[in-house]
Structures are given as structure tokens and as C-alpha cells.
Amino acid sequence: MPAHRPNHPRQSAEAVRPVVLTAFRIVVGLLFACHGAASLFGVLGGAKGGGTVPLGQWPGWWAALIQLVGGALVLLGAGTRAAALLCSGSMAYAYFTVHQEHALLPLQNGGEPSVMFCWAFLAIAALGSGPYALDRLFARRPLATAEPAVRPTSTA
């Protein structure tokens, strides 16, 4: 018999919370990075069904770069909160500048992926990377403090 077994559903939910948060971060980051790779390199079906976004084109190329780099950082859990906030903001921008002008609701204007990514990244930015992330690995290492080359001497 296990040493500790949660005897209340809330305890069970809290026990799996770190794993679920980590899995959510990894899946959202991977999917977002795939969108960026498709737009920048023409892989996975390419941008909008084929091809790539022209180099430096505003805002498409820059959005794809944010998707690839930001998604990869979130996937790895490196600089997670900042990367997720940038990704969330880019999706809010995409929704309001690209989709909303066509219709009010995301279901009508094709903006559902933008809205879902926006809110998913906002949740990740608020909740953090979870315990299984590079952020946690780097946080555990104490920063090396430089000692002065010459120690001061007292003049007594």
C-alpha cells in the first residue's frame, strides 16, 4: 500500500497540477512553434496552405518569428513568463487587426486560434512554467559571486 494516498478529490487534483501545467505549457509552445516554422520555412503545410511569408514583411514575418522563438522558449520553459506574455500580446494584436474587422465573434471571423493562443499564453504567463522547465533548472543554481581581487586591509 502506498505511503501517502490522497483521500480527497482536491488532494488528487493538487497532486497532478504540476504535471498538467507542464504538459499544457509544452503542448501550447509546440503548437505555436509549429505555426511559426510553417510560415517561415514552408514546412508542415506552409503559410496558409503553402509557401512562406516574405522575409521582413510586416506583420506576418515578425509574427511568425515570435511564434517560432516564443513557442520554442515556452516549450522548453526558458524565460517562460516573458515569452508567454509576448506570444499572448502578438495573438491579441493579430485578433484585433486581422480578424475582428471581418466580424464581431471569433467563430464568425476565423479568429478562434488567435483567441485561444492569446488566453493560453496569458494563463502560462500568470501561472509560470511549472516544475519541469529550464527556468527551474537555472533557478536552482546559485549565481557565482565574484570575490574582490584584493581584500581590504585595516589600518589600525
Image (tube, rainbow, N blue to C red):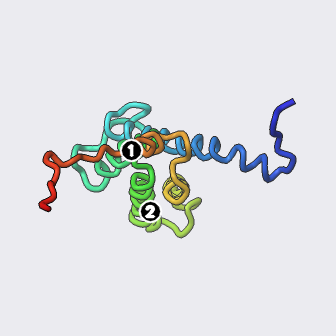
In the rendered image, residue 95, in percent from the top left (x then y), is placed at: 45, 62
Distance, label 2 to label 1, CA atoms, is: 37 Å
Vertical relation: 44 (above or below) 98 = above
Vertical relation: 126 (above or below) 5 = below
What amino acid does circle 2 point to? Ala
Of 142 and 67, nearer the camera is 142
Q: How crowded is mark 2: few (under 14 residues within 10 Å), some or many (20 or more)?
A: some
Disc 2, SS: helix
What amino acid does circle 1 point to? Pro
Q: Would residue 35 be seen by someone viewing this image from the given angle?
A: no
In the rendered image, residue 51, in percent from the top left (x then y), is placed at: 33, 36
Q: In which quarter of the image is the N terminus?
A: top right
Of 78 and 11, nearer the camera is 11
- Mark 2 and mark 1 residues within 8 Å of each other at the beta carbon: no
Q: Is residue 127 left or right of residue 3?
A: left
Tell me, for residue 122, which label it has, or none.
none
Q: Is residue 58 left or right of residue 50?
A: left
Q: Which residue is drawn at 15% across and 45% down?
A: 149
Q: In this view, does 9 lie to the left or right of 48?
A: right
Query: Badge 2 is on which residue?
Result: 92
Q: Residue at x 78, y 50 (%)?
A: 11
Query: Badge 1 is on which residue?
Result: 142
Quarter of the rendering containing residue 50:
top left
What is the residue that sits farthest to the front in this orientation? 156
Q: Which residue is drawn at 49% across and 57% down?
A: 125
